[in-house]
Amino acid sequence: MSNKTITSDVIIIGASASGLMCAIEAGKRGRRVIVLDHANRAGKKILMSGGGRCNFTNMDIDAANFISHNQHFCKSALSRYTQWDFIAMVKAHDIPYHERDLGKLFCDDSAKDILNMLLQECKKARAKVQLNCDIKDIERSADKLFKVRTSTGNYSAESLVIASGGLSIPKMCASPLGYKIAEQFGHHIWPTSPGLVPFTLQPDDKQRLEVLSGISVECLVSNERMQFNENILFTHRGLSGPAILQISSYWQPGESITINLLPDLSVVDLLTAKREKQPQLKLKNVLADVLPRRLLTVLLEADTIEQPLQNLSRDSISAIADKLQHWMIKPNATEGYRTAEVTLGGVDCDQLSSKTMESKITPGLYFIGEVVDVTGWLGGYNFQWAWSSGWCAGQVV
């Protein structure tokens, strides 16, 4: 490692979605930009997202789709660089994409298309990316320059942007570096926890439900604060699927969640009407039209599902409906950062400018993307926050 210091205008720590976007925008303004990342490849989380197809944004972006201790903070960035702006870049690069349920946009081919687009734009803007670069320490000198000592050399710049991400998916080189830098410069960090993450179950529930592994059902999953109407997936470890990942970001340890397995119909009305018309019909045959049989045999008693409808009283029907439409289950925990898609909490937004992402404590220091206390829903919202926050910082660094 040489003792020579490489001087630039902007140092960005993290070749992440937000870091690359910031590098592009700063480079376009003629700023000398260097992006430092300890991984051996840029944009690793971009490549693995959306099952390798990258759910790069959503058609419907709103501040209500984000969790933060300051619910208003994300509004400025999201309105200044919108999903339509990013879609325009994707179109300009002739990347084929499609819309899935709930406005989610995915690449037709591969997430590599999005990463290659960003790297091409970086090259065009003359922003350099230095990989395999471990940060040793950072200091701010008397002349107001940020000095960054790394495993590949020393760097100095007047603007330092932290785009190092959160703690989710450690195998993708996630690290707490961004939070440590924030604390070093006097920032408050809201406690971090895994978000958009599957649940593990209590031992009894796990044993009872693991035979359902692989079954997927459209449900309404709720707690006291939020509800989501999407699929749940039974796994050998517990519960996953979009609705579970979504509610996990609003879940507190020790809390139960309520699952309505048939949100679009009334089980009481269905069974009452069938009982009048076809009293000999067995309960299991009626319900098998609307739910997987394996699921019914686990949730309802064996002697109940074998009953003909004519044997069921009004109270019995209500009790069956309750089990299927107000199924309460208390998760044991989440699967943690290992499988979490995002990190909740992070750098306190009240100490940042919502327009530029600059620190209100240390001028010239910026925080963007997942390291900030802004966490999106499942569905392209976290990428949009990365693009928007990165773009905003890129206009001023």
Image: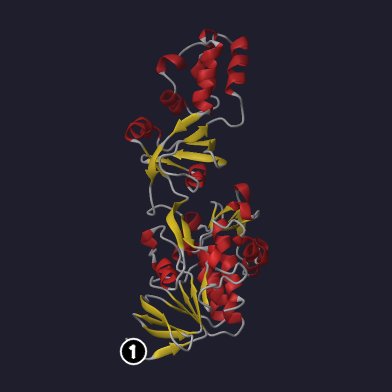
**Quadrant of the rendered image containing residue 215:** top left
Q: Position of residue 278 (x, y in %)?
A: 59, 11
Q: Looking at the image, is 99 positioned above or below residue 161?
A: above
* Front one among 45 and 145: 145
Q: Residue at x 48, y 54 (%)?
A: 51
Q: Residues within 10 Å of mark 1 (few under 14, many from 20)?
A: few
Give residue 344's position: percent from left, percent from top.
47, 55
For the point 54% across and 8% down, the residue is: 310
Q: Residue furthest bottom?
A: 4
Can residue 116 be seen from the camera position used here? yes
- Give the camera-side residue of 354 and 261: 354
Q: Is residue 192 above or below residue 231?
A: below
Q: Identify the amino acid type marked 1.
A: Ser
In the image, 265: left or right of 178? right
Q: Nearer the viewer, residue 265 or 118?
A: 265
Q: Is residue 119 above or below residue 192?
A: below
- In the structure shown, which secondary structural element does the residue marked by tag 1 occupy? loop
Closer to the camera, 157 or 359? 359
Image mark count: 1
Horizontal and vertical percent position of residue 202: 35, 36
The answer to whether residue 264 is left or right of residue 193 is: right
Q: Which residue is mark 1?
A: 2
